[in-house]
Image (spheres, grey):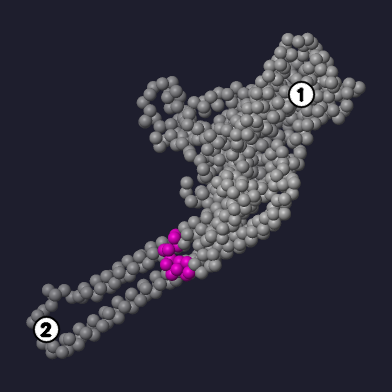
Amino acid sequence: MSFTAFFNYQTNLKPTWKKYYISYSELKESLLRIKDAFRKKSNESMTSALDTQQERTSLLHNNSNPHTPIHSINTNSVQPMHSDNIHEEETIEYHQEEDKEEHTIKIVDNYFQHQKIEIEENVKFEIKRFMEMFKKDVETVYKKYNNEIKRLKDRIKRNKIELENARGTPFFTSEIGPVLKEKFITIYRDLEFLYSFLHANRIACNNLLDKFTFCSGKCNELKQWYNSLPNSNFNTKELKETMESIESIFSKYFTFEDRDKALASLRQPNTHHSQLDSFKLALCIGMVIPLALMIVFMWFFREPLYDKFPGFFDVLPIYRSTMLYIMYGWLYGLNLYIWERNRVNFAYLFEFHPMNHLKYIKVWKTASVLTVFWFVFFFLYLATVKNYLTILDAKWYPLTMGLVLIFIAVLPMHVFHLSARYTLLQVLGKLLITPFGEIKFKHFFVADILTSMVIPITDTSYMLCYYFSNAWSGQVQNKCPDLNKVMAPLLTFLPFFWRLLQCCRRFYDDRTQKSQLLNALKYLCALLVIIFNTLHVNLERADDWGPFRWIWIFIIPVSTLYAFTWDILMDWGLFTIKRYNKTTDTNNSILTKVKRILGFEIVMRNRRLYRNKGVYRLAILFNCIARFAWAGTISTFSKQSKEYLNIVFGSIELCRRCNWSVYRLEWAAISNDEGFRKHVTVPGMKVIDSSKK
């Protein structure tokens, strides 16, 4: 990985610190401009010297030719002359020729000297600009470092006093101690980041000074200023001493003088999973298996059967929506696992904190806890309607489950990954104000995921209607299925409409992104499917073949094939179209003849992150089949005969979105076609290029 890529990665570790780093890319470009100016000056100086030499040669050649040829002189008519007179005339003639030549050379030199002066002014301006930028950036780095190290030292001092005062309290081990321990760990990792901040800027400064050596005089002046600074060359001695003081405090109060254990706690990134995480995951999976077996047994082999449950179809959307949400939690963990195993830098692409983001084991652990939670409530509901339990009425269990899940989602406490939930709520808030808010890759990605969660979103709206209208008590008739015929299309409409607005806003910000207009057309086709399906359901009878139904049936395959083609060619970038070379292919197969007729061929891209080409073919096949399930998710609303089909459609669509996410992020990491990043290179990845084998 080049230093430029490393430096760009370092600056993105904390977005709020970007403005404090040295403007390495800008300074490097300034040096290139100075070099170009020097190169231009050198070329023109060489041209000037060559032209001057040619002028001198021409003048000497013209003055050396006699007006009269020697053979035409009549020797008999020549009068004898004195030798001194001859020498005097030759001297005068020589000085006249010399004056004429010097005058010509002076004219030529003055012309080229004028050109040199203009170039030197440009060079001086660029050099002055580079030196001012360099000095300003270095001073900014020093100022930020001094302020930060002072702030961290004050925090250490306050926490140390608090630690000494709380050491003798009875609740130190259980309450105060863990809080102070976490504070010291946070300070230590801030110091580690500050060390990497200094290290990156030091290398950047040294690289820039080394590249500036071609301008020796100004480079020596800049180096002299750089070496005269108080903390010359970004000395990290003070920083290391501060880190050692925290290590001593931590080992003294928290690890019983075990320095190795203290270092392991201080330096271990909190994204790494522990054995406890693995144990909790295995425990929850072990609890789910017997619960699932008991539910299957009660479902099929005990009376009454599911179709005779009182009010079963009223609560089915509630259990279905929560089941699909939890299912996507498992699938997202699978995405993270695949990206981590194949070194896809998803944290960089999503702009997550590089040291404090969720990894697959923690996502799976949370999903497993929620899965146990879902199975327990569904088991209690079945046991109640089959008269095995009489603790509560059966209608209370789905209500309690929904309330607890909503409470977990908005709980402002450090449980169930508060920072991750807060980030998700921030992204959803940005989507609500689309297209006026900031649009980044993660906003695109989340909006695409929401287009696949049509069924759980509409079921959530049904759940709110079911409980707020008091239909769950049995005292009021349940009119939510009729209301859902209007609300479900509206909620289905929103994610696709957001994506349409995002594409238009992206094209408005960058007029070179013309492909965004075609992407917007894809979502427009999906919106037409939703609109005509809604018109057919609400304005036409189910058995009628009216105009809305015909248009709806016509648009479904068009929209599905359009979306599938866009997935393969644009979102995944798997294939490229290039001109077919007839001379290199001697095969006479049918495919070759088709290529010759068309004049082009479709080839798979060489650069990829996953080694096995077979997975790409399987992904294409699955995406093609599952796309028709996606068409079913946006075309079926609240028909009781299709309640179970909605579960199938919703599950297949979430699996398709998981499959799509794997290759969408791969293509986003390899290329920067949509221009979300300033730099094409994504650090920390190994790209396989089959064309170089």
* Left or right of 391 on screen, residue 600: left
Residue where numbered disc 2 is placed: 78
Whether residue 551 is visible here, answered yes or no, is no
**Residues in magenta?**
210-224
The residue at the point 8 percent across, 82 percent down is: 76
Label whose residue precedes the other's in the sequence (1 or 2): 2
> What residue would you read off at disc 1?
377
The local secondary structure at tag 2 comes to: loop
| Identity of the residue drawn at 67% across and 27% down | 284
Q: In this view, does 104 lie above or below 202?
A: below
**Residue 292 is covered by the magenta coloring:** no
Q: Which amino acid does label 2 sit on?
A: Val
Which image quadrant: the C terminus?
Answer: top left
Locate residue 35 relative to residue 449 in the image: left or right.
Answer: left
Please name the amino acid that badge 1 sits on: Phe
Asked whether 610 or 405 is in front, the reply is: 405
**Could you tell me if the residues under marks 1 and 2 are in contact, i.e. CB atoms within 8 Å?**
no
Above or below, 96 relative to 126? below
Which residue is drawn at the image coordinates 53% and 60% (left, top)? 237
Position in image of residue 239 (x %, y %): 57, 58
Main secondary-structure element of the magenta-colored stretch: helix
Q: Position of residue 100 (x, y in %)?
A: 30, 79
Residue 459: which quarter of the image?
top right
| Secondary-structure class at tag 1 | helix
In front: 677, or 113?
677
Task: Classify residue 102 by image quadrant.
Answer: bottom left
The percent position of residue 604, horizontal first and vertical second, equals 48, 31
Determine which quarter of the picture holds residue 240.
Answer: bottom right
- The total number of labels drawn is 2
Nearer the camera: disc 1 or disc 2: 1
Q: Nearer the viewer, residue 409 or 344?
A: 409
